Image: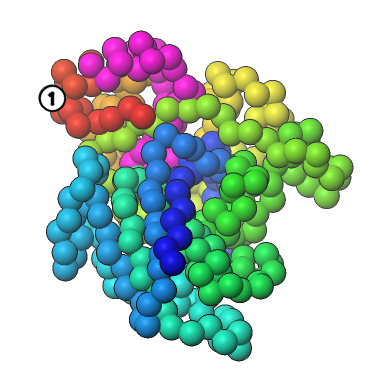
């Protein structure tokens, strides 16, 4: 028996760091949403042990290129979040008579080092697939607790299929879905009748990556808590794409564009072309409100003609 899931990434419509915590983590406030422009596929089948094969990327130990994609040096051992998630779940339910392991095959299309949460999305899918494979009856709260031990973004992806827009707080693991009838996801909100639909977007995928650790190290306390998320949420509720982009904020953008001159020139190129974009996560991908097919084709043509920006894709 083999089970397959399609895995979608996220973008950060708003991302602020509130403070650095005593445990070394950062307290954040971010609005995340899923995007369907690009996706991974993760398949799992029963096995005696745990293993992972990655296609579509250059991997450590096996080089298998099946699709045109961003090249990434992806580990296929326990450094990969897919295997870490599966092992964490088996450990959490060790009394549930789980037998054996799982053999995963990951077709990788979401760029790594892009701020799109691809690894976390793959990990969430691994948790859900293993729960099906092992026929587990596990409560959502318990699954979310397991997810939080794997990575801060993983809990968001567990619920993203039904609640694709959410406020994430704490170190990112406290998820509050944003309701379509409420501008602020707080206890004062009535029970939602529906969750917000994601903002239609295009992704800007450059041929370079960004390291999350370096992005955090480039920040100082002076960067923190300057943009209250409570100012953004009512604008998000308007559904006006131009206003949402104008009100969007990413705490990493200033230092990222200072460090990465190519990225700064790409952002300036897009703005000069009339299509300003915002950084997602700690970079290097950006997002902008969705544009028409003809405009996208023309913008792609112009990017291809710029030697320094060649290889950047709009999806």
In the image, 170 versus 21, the foreground residue is: 170
Residue 209 percent location from the top left of the image? 27, 46
Residue drawn at x 15%, y 59% as measured from the top left: 63
In the figure, 242 relative to 65: above or below?
Answer: above
Seen in the image, is 45 located left or right of residue 90?
left
In the image, 58 versus 274, the foreground residue is: 58
Seen in the image, is 78 located left or right of residue 302?
right
In the figure, 168 relative to 128: above or below?
Answer: above
Residue 169 lies in the magenta-colored region:
no
Residue 57 percent location from the top left of the image? 22, 52
Residue drawn at x 16%, y 64% as measured from the top left: 62
For disc 1, the marked residue is 307
In the image, 260 versus 304, the foreground residue is: 304
The span shown in magenta is 273-301
Residue 227 percent location from the top left of the image? 59, 38
**Is residue 275 among what the camera can see?**
yes
Q: Residue furthest front?
A: 1
């Amino acid at each position: 028996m083999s089970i397959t899931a399609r895995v979608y990434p996220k973008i950060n419509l708003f991302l602020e760091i509130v403070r650095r915590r005593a445990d070394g983590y950062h307290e954040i406030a971010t609005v995340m949403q899923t995007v369907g422009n690009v996706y991974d596929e993760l398949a799992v089948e029963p096995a005696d042990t745990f293993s992972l094969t990655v296609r579509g990327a250059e991997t450590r130990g096996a080089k298998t290129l099946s699709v045109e994609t961003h090249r990434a040096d992806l580990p296929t051992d326990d450094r990969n979040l897919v295997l870490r998630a599966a092992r964490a779940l088996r450990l959490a339910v060790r009394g549930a008579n789980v037998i054996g392991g799982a053999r995963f095959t990951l077709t990788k299309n979401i760029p790594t080092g892009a701020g799109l949460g691809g690894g976390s999305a793959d990990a969430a899918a691994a948790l859900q697939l293993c729960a099906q494979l092992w026929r587990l009856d596990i409560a959502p709260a318990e699954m979310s607790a397991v997810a939080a031990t794997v990575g801060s973004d993983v809990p968001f992806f567990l619920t993203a299929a039904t609640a694709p827009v959410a406020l994430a707080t704490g170190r990112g693991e406290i998820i509050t879905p944003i309701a379509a009838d409420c501008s602020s996801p707080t206890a004062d909100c009535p029970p939602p009748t529906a969750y917000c639909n994601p903002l239609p977007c295009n992704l800007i995928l450059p041929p370079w990556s960004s390291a999350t650790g370096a992005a955090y190290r480039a920040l100082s306390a002076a960067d923190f808590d300057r943009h209250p998320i409570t100012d953004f949420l009512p604008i998000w509720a308007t559904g006006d794409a131009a206003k949402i982009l104008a009100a969007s904020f990413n705490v990493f953008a200033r230092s990222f564009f200072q460090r990465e001159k190519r990225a700064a020139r790409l952002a300036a190129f897009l703005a000069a072309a009339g299509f300003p974009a915002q950084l997602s996560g700690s970079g290097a991908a950006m997002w902008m409100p969705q544009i028409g097919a003809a405009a996208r084709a023309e913008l792609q043509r112009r990017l291809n003609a710029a030697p320094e920006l060649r290889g950047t894709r709009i999806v």
